[in-house]
Amino acid sequence: MEQAVEKLHEIDNFIKNNYQIPESGDFAAIKAYADAVYEYLVNNYHYNYDVANELQPITDQEARRKRHDELISLEKCILAKKGLCRQLSELHITLVASRIFETGSNVRCGILDVNFTINNGTISPHSVSFLYRNNNLYVYDVTSGLFRSVKRHEPKAFCGIPSPYYPAKAKTYMTYIASVQSKNIKYVEPKPLKLVFECFNDLKKGLQIEDMTQIMTNTIFSPKPFVPTNIY
């Protein structure tokens, strides 16, 4: 675990030393930091196709979850420089939440779980990270940012985009997707880097998980502002 925390600090120091980001807690500075972390991850990390291919044929959800947790974790993702969408999103937001804490910012952040409805009617779960401000979510999809086509044609296609634009952007690069729906939104409490990391090792600790109603869910990906409830 200590090695993973050291690697997180290494990434944080790289961002601080290589990007001219103000030591400020205002939204522009926090977003600049989140953008820089996104850029670092899509240029240095990879999608773990071996794990994805092993999990794909497991149809029982409980068995799939158990095998998933045996094969991969945020710690393993950090050290191996590869993961699935959940770990890549957690890695991104771990650094961002720590930055928010350091600057005393009131910007909120977290993980948004979504469902992709595939053209054949099946559901494919996916996770992205986000910043929240003034009833708007700004989505970071590190996994989609790893696609060669994205890097080649539109490197920042999934870097902090307003949530209403996300479904169309996803369908542009994943033509097998028929629709995109949000599922759970998880607000992450800003804490020191190690503590945020530990929260993701135990989801019962430190995360506030709120299942959205259908109306709230729809507004995340619509032009109408998303109005959250029960945010700390």
Image: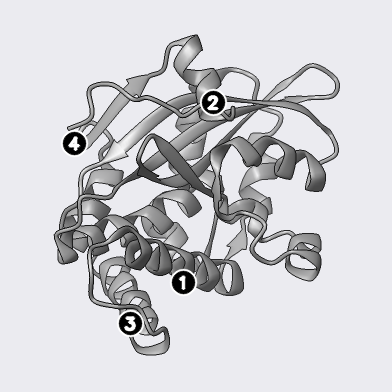
The numbered disc on residue 182 is 2
Q: Earlier in the sequence, mark 2 or mark 3?
A: 3
As drawn, the residue found furthest toward the bottom would be 17
Determine whether the residue tagged by mark 4 lies in a helix, strand or loop: loop
Please state which of residues 77 and 129 is positioned toward the viewer in this rendering. 129
Determine whether the residue tagged by mark 2 lies in a helix, strand or loop: strand
Q: Is residue 127 above or below residue 158?
A: above
Please state which of residues 214 and 59 is positioned toward the viewer in this rendering. 214
Alpha-carbon span between mark 3 and mark 1: 9 Å
Identify residue for label 3: 16
Identify residue for label 1: 36
Determine whether the residue tagged by mark 3 lies in a helix, strand or loop: helix
Q: Is residue 81 left or right of residue 30?
A: right
Please state which of residues 112 and 28 is positioned toward the viewer in this rendering. 28
Circle 2 crowding by C-alpha within 10 Å: few under 14, some 14–19, many from 20: many
Identify residue for label 4: 205
Q: Mark 2 or 4, which is nearer the eye?
A: 2
Residue at image x 25%, y 64%?
99
Alpha-carbon span between mark 2 and mark 4: 23 Å
Kind of residue indicated by mark 4? Lys
Kind of residue indicated by mark 1? Ala
